[in-house]
Image (tube, rainbow, N blue to C red):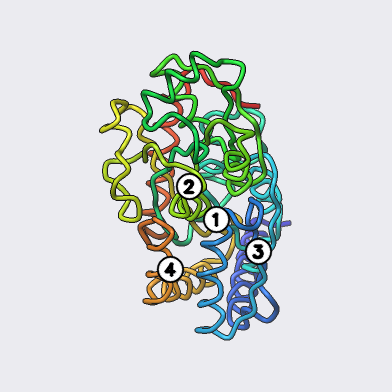
Amino acid sequence: MPIRRFILFALGVFAFAATAATAHADDYPSRPIRVIVGFAAGGGNDLFARLVIQKFQEQTGHKAIIENKPGAGGRLASEYVAKQAPDGYTVMVGATGQMSIATAVIHNITYNAMTSFIPLNMIASFPLVLVVPGDHPANNVKELVAWAKAHPDKSNYGTSSPAFTIAAELLKLKTGMPAVAIPFKGSNESNTCVLSEQCLFTISDGPPAIPLVLAHKTKALAVTGSERSPLLPNVPTMAEAGYPEVNIELWSGFFVPAGTPKPIVDQLTRELGKALADAHVQEGLKKMAVTPGGPTGAAFGKVIAKDIETYKGVAAAAHLKFD
């Protein structure tokens, strides 16, 4: 094929693809959008998704269906979504553990948080809560450490994400306490394990943990982050408890597969942003002990990139290995 004809052919293909993408975006969405959550129902990310997506449907009239695909700390969902068609009909609720931390410390995953997805909106950022059974004799972190050292055969913790595991392993590293991880599919299950006294402690997100604490069924000993939780004003930060290095703060956000057309990305970002800005949604998120909203698009991507470098350092310092 002569060079001139080849160039014209290539330009025609490009123009056709661009036109097709625009036409596709013009009638988007023409069928229900699937929203994939990588954790079991009742956990923090699931609750965030249901609150925001309900308002998204009310405001737009678009049908969106929540699908829970728990497993491997959210990684099964990420692997699944990364392979879906980039057409805007598969949206993922991604969390720090399955995105930044997994990319930073797990070498055999089939996706990368920076290249396999396009970030849309951060839903919320939040600290973690260290909880023990309600009638446990430990009333602060130092007492918990001492108890675990005295009863190593009874020291374990529930975890459903690399994020929670890193926080617990950092606590072990900084205190010398023993504890064996018990994996679960969602943080609500980790908290139930503590409630039933099958787990000594868990470090989890607030939504499943705080209601049990407020009902005096479990006991919060500390929160991560730089400030106390407004919902747990009498619970000290890890820094106040004497362990400032155990300072893990997480986020949750919406993502689509890489390659999703920009008009669709922009539309989803805009409409999800409106849902997140709703007063009812904001109040609902605050009641779950999180800070609503956050950066979108490229700015959100910069947060993820910075996290990846941070958690690479944390994992190296704590000698953590994940499969």
First of labels 3, 2 by sequence position? 3
Residue type, label 3: Thr
**Does the CB distance between marks 1 and 2 fall below 8 Å?**
yes
Cα–Cα span, label 4 and label 3: 25 Å
The residue pinned by badge 3 equals 90
Cα–Cα span, label 1 and label 3: 16 Å
The residue pinned by badge 1 equals 45
Q: Secondary structure at mark 2?
A: strand
Badge number at residue 205: 2
Residue type, label 2: Asp
- Coordinates of residue 67 in the picture (x, y in percent): 69, 62
Q: Secondary structure at mark 3?
A: strand
Q: Secondary structure at mark 1?
A: helix
First of labels 1, 4 by sequence position? 1
Front-lying residue, 196 or 239:
196
Residue type, label 1: Asn
Determine crowd level at label 1: few under 14, some 14-19, many 20+ residues with C-alpha closer than 10 A.
Answer: many
The residue pinned by badge 4 equals 284
Q: How many marks?
A: 4
First of labels 1, 2 by sequence position? 1
First of labels 4, 3 by sequence position? 3
Front-lying residue, 252 or 84:
252
- Give the quarter of the figure containing the N terminus: bottom right
Cα–Cα span, label 3 and label 2: 25 Å
Quadrant assignment, res 12: bottom right
